[in-house]
Amino acid sequence: MQEIKENIRQQLYGFYIAYDLWLSNGAKPGGVFSQSYGLCANLFDYLTLIGAPSEAALEQLHTDFRSAGLNEVLPFNESKGHYYEEKGNNMCHVNPARVAWVRAQMVQAVPDGLVKAVRFYEQVKCENPPAETGAWKDAVDWVLKEACQAVNIGIKGE
């Protein structure tokens, strides 16, 4: 049972890391994450992409919200109306409370491999503008792979 719980926690850490990388790189539409979804829907899509079951991880996410004293359905919004306005304007991803939650959760998941990956990613980003070299894509691919390995999950299709 403890091993299952740990695996769920690692899946959540992997999600938070990937979500934060997406935010840090401009939160562009069209990928696995959506600007108009909250964390629950984005977690579901992320887990579907990596081929992992979602029910237990979503339950753990709701438990984490409750443990933090938040509403498990709308933890980062004042009301349903506030959420629907945010959703309709594709602004869920910039909600300060949601971003702060993701970053606070990530503090608990900083494996050495990920730190190395992110530093390499930042170095390549500074040294090689994306329009001038394929190194950018290689760096992003490497960071994603390293992040997944650091949290013991695989990339779907590999």
Image (cartoon, rainbow, N blue to C red):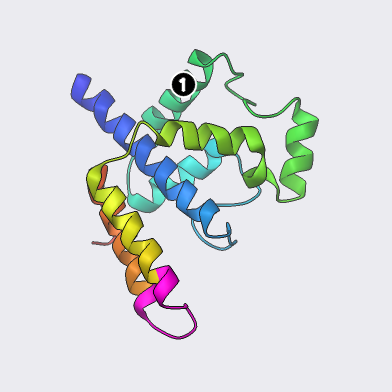
* x and y percentages locating residue 24 in the rendered image: 52, 54
User: What residue occupies the far bottom of the structure in this picture?
Assistant: 132
* x and y percentages locating residue 14 in the rendered image: 35, 43
Task: Tell me where residue 53 sits by quadrant.
Answer: top left
Task: Tell me where residue 137 sits by quadrant.
Answer: bottom left
Query: Is 86 contained in the magenta span?
Result: no
The correct choice, above or below, for 110 with respect to 75 in the image is below
* x and y percentages locating residue 92 in the rendered image: 66, 43
Q: Amino acid at mark 1?
A: Asp
Examine the rendering and report whether any part of residue 146 can be seen. yes
Query: Is 132 contained in the magenta span?
Result: yes
Horizontally, residue 23 falls left or right of residue 90, namely left
Residue drawn at point x = 46 percent, y = 19 percent:
63
What SS does tag 1 mark? helix
Horizontally, residue 127 falls left or right of residue 117, namely right
Residue drawn at point x = 26 percent, y = 55 percent:
146
Examine the rendering and report whether any part of residue 144 can be seen. no
* x and y percentages locating residue 36 in the rendered image: 66, 48
**Quadrant holding the C terminus:** bottom left
In the foreground, 101 or 83: 101
Which residue bears the numbered disc 1?
64
Q: Which residues are magenta?
A: 125-136
The correct choice, above or below, for 138 with respect to 74 in the image is below
Residue drawn at point x = 70 percent, y = 29 percent:
77
The correct choice, above or below, for 17 with respect to 29 in the image is above
Horizontally, residue 121 falls left or right of residue 32, namely left
Badge 1 crowding class, 10 Å Cα cut-off, few under 14, some 14 to 19, many 20 or more, is: some
